[in-house]
Every structure is written in structure tokens, then in C-alpha cells.
Amino acid sequence: MNEPHGERISVEIPGLERILRGGFLPGRSYLVSGGPGTGKTTLGLQYLASSADGNGLLISLGESERNLRADALRIGLSLDGTSVIDLSPGADAEPEAAYTLLEPWEAEGVDIRSRIGALLPDGPPERVFIDALSQLRQLMPDAYQFRKQVMGLLEYLNSAGTTVLYTAEQGSSADTDLRYLGDGILELEHRENRRILRVLKFRGSGFSEGEHTLRLGDHGMQVFERLMPGEHRRTYVAEELPCGIGELDRLSGGGITRGTVTIISGPTGVGKTSLGLQYMHEAARRGERSVVYTFEESIGTLRTRCEAIGIPVSDMMAKGSLSIDEVEPLHYSPDEFAWRVRTEVEQQGARMVMLDSLAGFRQSVRGDDITAHAHALCHYLSNMGVTVLLVNEQSAIAGEELRPSEDDINYLADTIVLLRYMELDGGLRKAIGILKKRTGDFEKTLREFQITREGLRVGAPLYGLQGILQGIPSKIATLDATE
């Protein structure tokens, strides 16, 4: 029984239905175009297996039925209720008989449409997948006969209410012809660093434009939608969020503002991650959930050193107020990483997110523009009322020109917290200051910053010194009143 007009035909490929605004439109035809190994057949098999009643029709002009059923089983799909018309090379004992199956409609003999009628006298099912329809072009005398046969076949199926997916090898002459015959085009591509899916045409419906990451695995295909931050928004109160350290909260004008982006910048080992976890510790006291994405440090190391300074990471994780996600940057594309973040925000209710660090996030971008991906992610989080902490590691310990971030993303920051080493009185000390805060006033001073067994400490303003930002402070000379 075909689905009523107006309803969507589900795909049950994670992420794809969101891109297609719910699925395919019933009674339409869609081309899946791509090169070898891009996942065209996998998409079609999952489409057939998504049928609620298990009924569907697979017409294969490329792979044999035996191979296709084996491929489906490898990714956990059953085609038990699926009818199959095998027109692959060698499917029939007599080669000439196989050829007559693909003769033009006007010719005598058996054609594809007749095969469907003979196999399914009550009419075609609601789902049909034609694998390698472009192979038909090789057996047609010219492009006109090829288009005529395809148009007749698609019209026959669509008029019966059937939704058709058919594949073609990208770049072939058949692919060019087939692009004009369907109601939609899904294009698959395998690049050096990732697989992508694009929707080029989708008549009668909107869709998510752009390049979306695609992954093929043991359970088939999964699609990670390109993040469009303007499509996501949540109402929230832009309140100040303290860190629980009185001196630092005074320095920052009451804290950082909810729904804003803060860059915590400084050289290695200065305390950037510890400071971010301190804000999350205070969030846990408010009953809020936070998540740390660590690209470089293991969960065990991070937990051990935070607990050594009084931040109870294990307890926070046990209570569900903190999640630490150890990310291998080379394993995830920006779209996949954004999907992980969205899952935490939309399903787990995270209110504060920290990326530790921007250098690790840059690795996941792998040649793409980090500014564009960071902008999309931070804009999305801000729209959802999530407070963002970006940890940026400066390459130089001291003496270098002050650059809060190695990338051109300082414009994303509503607040910039700077941590610096300084040599003072023959010892190595640390200083903290606020360089920028869009959402309110802040103290224009630098204070001493310490990491102790009892926790983080922020001292009084460092008056009477200059050169702190360069790491080599000196006392400011005062004029003698007698001169």
C-alpha cells in the first residue's frame, strides 16, 4: 500500500532525512550520482530496507543479486521482503536473452517494464531502487532511445505512486542525460580527506544546501549535516556567570556572559584549561551541565591534575554535570564534530562548552578554512544560549608580540582572557588580565595568577609595573617631588 500523497518517504539514514526535510516526496524519481565506491548502492539498499512493510523492488544492471544481498547483510540489512530483477551481465544463461531484456520498448521481446509486470502483477511497490541505470546507455543505439526508455520506465513507476531511486556513474554521458529526467539529484564524492554528499536538485521541497560529510561503516551510511547556525535558536537570559573566585570576578566585571564566546589565551602550562574547568565547576554548583572537548590531553591526565588543585572532576562527571570528550582530530571532519556538539546541547542539555584547544580543532579542519567552521559552531552555540570557552595556546612563552589567537578568529570573542608568564624578583610568576569584553565593563588591570593545591588564586592588581604583557616587567619610575 503506497503512502498517501504529501507524506514523506523515510530513508532512515542518520542525518539524511534532516537534509531532505523529512525524506523523499512520494511518487517522484531521484538520481544518486557518484564515482565508484562513493556509496551509491549502499544508499539505495538502505532506502529499500527502510520500508515499513519490507516490500520493495531492486532492479540491478550492475552487480548480481547474490552480491547485492551479501553486501546488504554485511551492513546489517535484510532484503528478505524485497523483490529482485537481476539484469546484471551473466544473470541469464543465454547471453542473447540477457541482451533482449534491454531492447527498446517498441522491439519484440521482454523489456524491464514487462519484467516488473510479470513479477508483480498487482503493480510495483512504493519503493524501487534501480542500481546502475547508466549501464543501460551502453546497450542503446543512441541517446534518444536511451532517454525514451528511461522516461517511459520512470513515468510508469511514478504514475503508480512509486518512489524511485536510480544510480549513475558520475561524468558518464548517461549521467548527464539522467540529471534532466529525475525530480532530484543527490551527488556523492570521495575526496582525499573525507566523503561528501550534495543535494543539487529537489523539486517540490526545500533542502539543506552545501556539502555535507558522509561516512560509510559497518552499519552502512551516515550523513552529517553542514551546520547552518541561523536555523537554530533558543531563548535565554544573558546573565553574568561568575567563576567563584572573587578577585577574578571583579577583574572581569562580574564574570563571563551567558551565550557568549570567551577566548582563554596563553602559553603552554600557564593554566588555561584549569581556568576553564573552574568556570565549569561553578556551573555545576548552579546545577548546569558542561562539556569539554579535549583534542590533545587524555581524560585521565586532565582529571588527575584538576583534582590536585581542588576541582572535583570525577564527582562532577559522576553526577552528570560534566562530560569530557576525548577527540581524535584526524578522525572527525568539522561536520562530524559539530554533530557531536549538537548532540550534547540538544539532547543532553549542555550549557557550557569548552574546546581545548583551537590547535586541535584546526587539525580536524584539515586544510579547510578554520575561521568559517569556528564561526558556524560558535554562532550556533551562542544562538542556543550556550557559553563557549575557546582555549588558545600561544607559541611563545614571553617576549613575543601579543596575539590572543594564532588564527583570525579574535572577532568571534566577546571576551578575551589573557594569561602570561612573567619574571619578577628572580622568580617565574603568572599574570591574568581581561583584554576585551563586549557585554559590559571590566577592570583594566593585570593581577597575579596562581595555581595552588587549594585551587586557583588571583591576587591584587599589579600596580607600578610595566612590560608585564611581554613577560619582562619593570618598575615604573616615579618623579621625585623635590625635583
Image: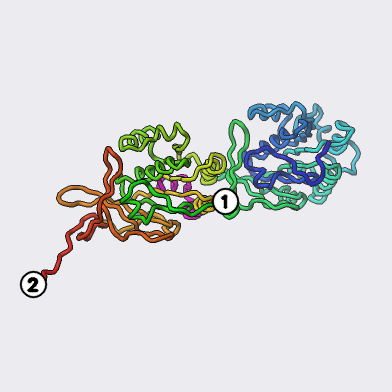
Residue 300 coordinates in the image, percent (x, y) = 38, 32
Amino acid type, mark 1: Arg
User: 179 or 455, which is in the foreground?
Assistant: 455
Amino acid type, mark 2: Thr
User: 50 or 154, which is in the foreground?
Assistant: 50
On-image quarter of the N terminus? top right
**Magenta region's main secondary structure?**
helix
The answer to whether residue 258 is above or below residue 102 is below
Q: What stretch is highlighted in magenta?
A: 356-375
Q: Name the residue under label 1.
A: 234
On the rendered structure, is 20 left or right of 279? right
Q: Distance between the residues labelled 1 and 2?
A: 64 Å
Q: Name the residue under label 2.
A: 482
Q: Which residue appears at 48% of the width and 54% of the height?
A: 238
**Which mark is first along the chain, 2 or 1?**
1
> Can residue 329 be spotted in the picture?
no
Q: Which residue lies furthest to the bottom in this view?
A: 483
Q: Which residue appears at 76% of the width and 34% of the height?
A: 58
Residue 366 falls inside the magenta stretch: yes
Residue 405 falls inside the magenta stretch: no
Dot 2 lies on which element?
Answer: loop
Residue 272 coordinates in the image, percent (x, y) = 34, 46
On the rendered structure, is 247 left or right of 89? left
Q: Decide: marks 1, 2 in contact (CB < 8 A)?
A: no
Residue 42 coordinates in the image, percent (x, y) = 66, 36
Q: Which of marks 1 and 2 is in front?
A: 2
The answer to whether residue 171 is above or below residue 79 is below
